[in-house]
Image: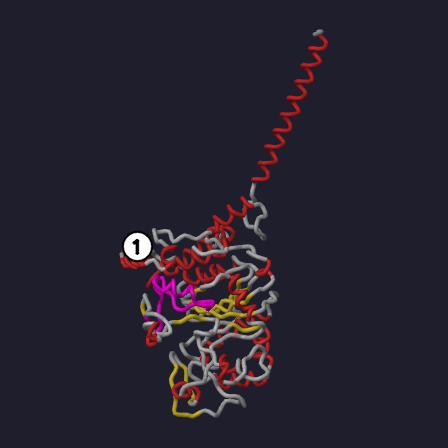
Amino acid sequence: MRLCDRSLWAARRRGALLVAAVLLVAALSFRSASLTCPDGPVSDAPREPHCRQRLYRALELSPGRGINCSGIVRGDEKAIQQAQLSSLEVANKRVPLTPRDYLNMTKDCGDFRATRRFIEFPLSQEEAEFPIAYSMVIHNKIEMFERLLRSIYAPQNVYCVHIDAKSPSDFQEAVRAIAACLSNVFVASHLESVVYASWSRVQADLNCMRDLLHSPVLWRYVLNTCGTDFPIKTNAEIVRALKVLQGRNSMESEKPSAYKRERWKYHHQVGTAISRTAQQKLPPPLSSPMFTGNAYFAATRAFVQHIFDNPLAQQFLEWSKDTYSPDEHIWATLNRVPGVPGAMPQNDKYQLSDMNALPRLVKWQYLEGDITKGAPYPPCTGKHQRSVCIYGAGDLPWMLQQHHLLANKFDPMVDDAAIQCLEEHLRHSALYGRGL
């Protein structure tokens, strides 16, 4: 081989190696770029599978103290018993977060949303196109409120929070700080001093409902909650359940017993508590009959607009102001009045008990028992307050088989494992489409 041929061959070899090196660097750079996931908050789920997987893992919730939540939701007796024993041990009693803790956490809103694992993007197109409004009436337990909000939170929804005007100032300040960190959460423009079983409880919801109508979010349905509620369905499942209603409302509505008729037969006075007087009331200003139910509803936007715009509905609300526990008969009655948007007919065929309505799953102590012998539900595994079950971890397997959207009551001081496992299960279902 000639010297010039050797030089040419060597030059070509060096050129080929240089091109290969450049291509290798470019390939590695491209791979590195493709593996880089966006940092910070995102408005949409990442398209790259590895980025979505990483983000979803960061959004998972864990009970954090050795509770076997997958066993509990499946009904494993050993897992349930271990959780019950653990909750009795003083060493395992978790100290709840305080208003001061939340005031500190919300100094950096981005960090608060990330640390507390709020989902900041719609998890599906179906959910994005079906915004829901919430009226949240609360008065204490700041951490329970924040955990409830996180579990029902989606960025396309809108949330009005009514704080009892009697609540401590640090609690109110902490709620406002949390709301300030979430653009679709706000505190009601007017706050009531709520007295149990009085009109003020209804007015709290009405204040939020009016504010929600003025929200730029074009929500389809409104759900109302209190501080001891917790969802038993994901946002996607709630959307699908509401779609099935096809524009109807869902709430308990039944013929009243003689005992419950007494609630609107007499004038009631309200001070620090509500009391009945001997003064009889005039009949209600409706040509249709009265019905009873509970405080909870799933109502269409048109229903809410109607109760503010319709003179007869307004007269009925005014008449109800001095009745006992009006929240347990005004919604049930309005939803059976002909012409009301989304209402049900008055015929007995359309009676709807709390177990058949969507909004709330409640266990009443005097109805608990053996299902095989005709009881509507099994005994409470937690404790009772005013004859209502405060759920324990052992209630979860049965609860998750029900069609309701939320359940009542929960209390972390009674059984925090029940709430923790429900949180973990719902978050896993929301992210991956399946439970634990």
Chosen colour scheme: secondary structure
* Image position of 128 with respect to 49: above or below: below
Left or right, residue 199 beside residue 248? left
Answer whether residue 199 is visible to the viewer in this image.
Answer: no
Q: Quadrant location of the N terminus?
A: top right
Q: Position of residue 232 (x, y in %)?
A: 44, 64
Q: Depth check: 300 or 212 in front?
A: 300
Q: Which segment is the magenta one?
A: 384-412
Which structural element holds mark 1? Answer: helix
Q: Name the image quarter holding residue 133.
A: bottom right
Left or right, residue 306 beside residue 379? right
Q: Position of residue 389 (x, y in %)?
A: 35, 70
- The structure residue drawn at horizontal position 38% and vertical position 84%, both measured from the top left corner, is 275
- The structure residue drawn at horizontal position 61% and vertical position 32%, both measured from the top left corner, is 27
Asked whether 197 falls inside the magenta stretch, the response is: no
Q: Position of residue 346 (x, y in %)?
A: 52, 85
* Image position of 346 with respect to 220: above or below: below
Q: Name the image quarter holding residue 81.
A: bottom left
Query: What count of labels does the image hold?
Result: 1
Answer whether residue 228 is visible to the viewer in this image.
Answer: yes
Left or right, residue 226 beside residue 24? left
Mark 1 belongs to which amino acid?
Asn
Q: Depth check: 26 or 229 in front?
A: 26
Asked whether 391 falls inside the magenta stretch, the response is: yes
Q: Quadrant location of the C terminus?
A: bottom left
Q: Position of residue 17 (x, y in %)?
A: 64, 21
Task: Look at mark 1 in the image and give the residue it sits on.
Answer: 92
Residue farthest toward the top in the current orientation of the protein: 2
